Image (tube, rainbow, N blue to C red):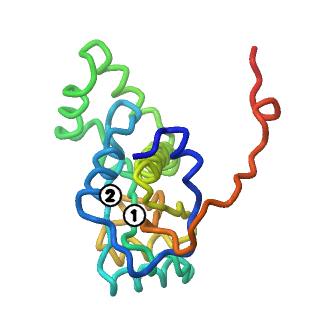
Amino acid sequence: MLSFPEALQYRHAVRHFDVNKKIPEKDMKFVLESALKAPSSLNLEHWEYIIVQDKSMKSKLKDVCFSQQQVEDASAVAVILAKKDKLLDPKSPEVNQLIRERIPENGVPIAINFLESFPNSETFTSWSKSQCYIAGSFLMMAAASIEIDTCPMEGFVNDEVLKLLDYSSEEYEVALVIPMGYRKEPGTPPKVRASLEEKVTFI
């Protein structure tokens, strides 16, 4: 297993996967269990993971991801769905109970008021998706630590992906599509990043 600095250096967005190399079940389990440890606002775990491994389904998924070949060539594709306000309504007994189980008692009224404060569904969904991006980062770094490659994608047709996977667009929005597998070409290209001095201000 790579150290965290090594995994940071190893990870890059791979667009050409080895179609003959598959992710072992135990490694997939490790990556997904790691992703589920990601933090989330109010500890509500705003995400659902759909792991597409079937060859025919990956081909169909590629068609609604602007024909990006890495979707079909990857060993598996993680589709991260963000829960919309319909599924996280604090007036729902199930959600209300979830809040009470996961938040200290004195914080429950604050959490409920926060969830009720969103002006519209779009703002709520944007907040929910932002939680999923954090989870996606956990997934990609866990994968990199055992030398599994990923390619985070926002290039997809949301409603078509949901229709293909048989999920309701009233309840979910696609946050990320992440092909997973093993790079076809060995080696890691150099990372081009701004310096710490350019991007960080200490006050």
Where is residue 48 drawn, in percent x and y? 31, 54
Residue shown at the point (56%, 80%) measured from the top left = 66
Q: Which residue is mark 1?
A: 79
Quarter occupied by the C terminus: top right
| Nearer to me, 34 or 95 | 34
Q: Which mark is residue 123?
A: none
192 vs 182: above or below = above
Disc 1 is placed on an element classified as strand
How many neighbours does mark 2 have within 10 angstroms: few (below 14), some (14-19), or many (20 or more)? some
Tell me which corner region of the image, top left, top right, bottom left or bottom right, holds residue 50.
bottom left
Q: Which residue is mark 2?
A: 49
Where is residue 76 drawn, in percent x and y? 36, 70
| Nearer to me, 4 or 151 | 4
Residue shown at the point (55%, 75%) measured from the top left = 16
| Nearer to me, 130 or 10 | 10
Q: Mark 1 belongs to which amino acid?
A: Val
Residue shown at the point (55%, 52%) measured from the top left = 10
Q: Is residue 120 visible?
A: no
Q: Mark 2 belongs to which amino acid?
A: Tyr
Q: State left or right for residue 96 relative to residue 183.
A: left
Q: State left or right for residue 202 relative to residue 111.
A: right
Give the mark nearest the N terminus, 2 or 1: 2
Q: Are marks 2 and 1 in contact (CB under 8 Å)?
A: yes
Tell me which corner region of the image, top left, top right, bottom left or bottom right, holds residue 106.
top left
Where is residue 146 drawn, in percent x and y? 40, 52
| Nearer to me, 3 or 157 | 3
> In the orientation shown, which residue stands out farthest toward the right?
198
